[in-house]
Amino acid sequence: MTKTLVARLAAFAGGVVVSFAALASGGEGVMHAGNDLGDQASLQRGAALYMNYCSGCHSLKYLRYSRMAEDLGLTEDEVMNNLNFTGAKFGEQIQVAMPHGSAEKWFGKMPPDLSLIARVRGSDWIYTYLKSFYVDESRPLGWNNQLFANASMPNPLWELQGLQHAEFGEPDEIGERHVKALKVTQPGRQSAAEFDQTVRDITNFLQYAGEPAALKREKLGVWVILFLVALTFLAYLLKQEYWSDVH
């Protein structure tokens, strides 16, 4: 019994160490997104960008059009006329416009839902990923990604960013050459600063989509803190009154 317990504790401790090591290694080379959930204009731009460039392949099945409109300060007409490309009803979830059969034919399987991608990967990872595509003619779709090598998707924002190529370092011990730097060789429709803001807006929207309640929770948090401050002050006055009688 004791040996079994010790073995389980040792396995748990080992798992924790491995998990922390994996998290630490996953953060290498990741850029800071700098997004702000309190920036409603950024969230609105991010919603428009996501619907135009990402929703054709990736759903947000845990988010409804009506909830998005309420949280982002949009009217029903604005959402249904500009952000709904599937013909879904206002109260329905955000699904992909691409048929499942076509997705399996083109990509081998249906692209993943991105409702929780920000909670799983983090906003910095998404921001870096969207900026790290480069042309790779050896890949079936002609693209690769520095952060997530051999990703099975093309660069959805290449027209905005332009064509980006990789500069490789010297071969390692097993003869593999790793990406040293990325360079835009053919400019897109946006400048570097404009594209950074575009990616930041999409990242901001995906962070919101992962936890829509975060917007209201952060607003309520201010009132909760003020209540606790007031309660502490009243408790202090009560303490003073009580101990004045004791003395």
Image (tube, helix red, strand yellow):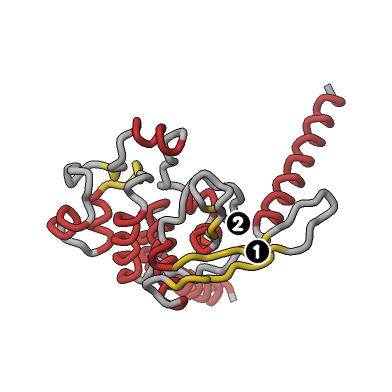
- Place of residue 22 in the rendered image (x, y in percent of width and height, measured from the top left): 70, 49
Q: Is residue 121 left or right of residue 104?
A: right
- Mark 1 secondary-structure assignment: loop
- In this rendered view, identify the residue nearer to me: 181 or 72: 181
Where residue 185 appears, x then y in whole percent?
52, 71
Where residue 147 is drawn, which disc sits there?
A: 2
Q: Quadrant of residue 81?
A: bottom left
Where is 57 relative to 118, above or below? above
Q: What is the residue that sits farthest to the top in this orientation?
A: 1
Residue type for callout 2:
Leu
Amino acid type assigned to the residue bearing label 1 in the image: Gly
Query: Local crowd at mark 1 within 10 Å, few (<14), some, or many (≥20)?
Result: few
- Residue at 48% over, 65% down: 163
Q: Which mark is residue 112?
A: none
Would residue 202 be visible to someone looking at this image? yes
Q: How many marks?
A: 2
Q: Alpha-carbon neighbours of circle 2 within 10 Å: few (<14), some, or many (≥20)?
A: many
From this viewpoint, is residue 226 visible?
A: no
The residue positioned 12% from the left and 57% from the top of the image is 77
Q: Are marks 1 and 2 in contact (CB under 8 Å)?
A: yes
- Image coordinates of residue 204 in percent, x first then y, are 41, 63
Please, is residue 158 above or below residue 148 in the view?
below
Which residue does the image show at 65% across and 63% down from the upper left? 29
- Residue topped by disc 1: 29
